[in-house]
Amino acid sequence: MSVYKTSKKVRYMSSIIFVLLMAFVVGGSYLAQQNKAGTEMTTDSLNNL
């Protein structure tokens, strides 16, 4: 392979890894936020009994 093709492949692979990492971080943050909102709602419901 030429240097150009090799560098193109490496850049492509690194961009895929970056996108997967960002999806993991954003998805985890979203799920944590949803879980926190659900916990607060449950706690409020229990306090009102």
Image: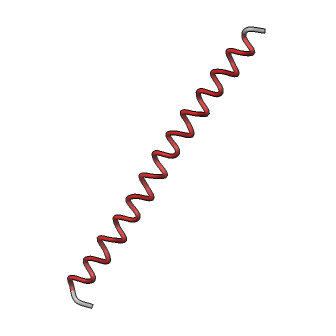
Q: Is residue 48 left or right of residue 21?
A: right
Q: Count how many numbered circles sit on residues in the image.
A: 0
Residue 20 is situated, as x and y percent measured from the top left of the image, at 45, 59
Where is 23 relative to 10, above or below?
above
Residue 11 is situated, as x and y percent measured from the top left of the image, at 29, 70
- Specify the farthest residue to the bottom: 1
Residue 47 is situated, as x and y percent measured from the top left of the image, at 72, 11
Look at 78% across and 9% down and name the residue there. 49
Look at 70% across and 22% down and name the residue there. 42
Q: Quadrant of the N terminus?
A: bottom left
Q: Choose top left, top right, bottom left or bottom right for residue 17.
A: bottom left
Q: Choose top left, top right, bottom left or bottom right for residue 38.
A: top right
Q: Is residue 24 left or right of residue 10?
A: right
Residue 8 is situated, as x and y percent measured from the top left of the image, at 27, 76
Q: Choose top left, top right, bottom left or bottom right for residue 19.
A: bottom left
Which color scheme did the rendering employ for the protein?
secondary structure
Where is 1 relative to 24, above or below?
below
Look at 31% across and 77% down and name the residue there. 9
- Specify the farthest residue to the top: 48
Look at 59% across and 29% down and name the residue there. 36
Where is 32 relative to 17, above or below?
above
Where is 31 relative to 36, above or below?
below
Q: Is residue 39 left or right of residue 27?
A: right
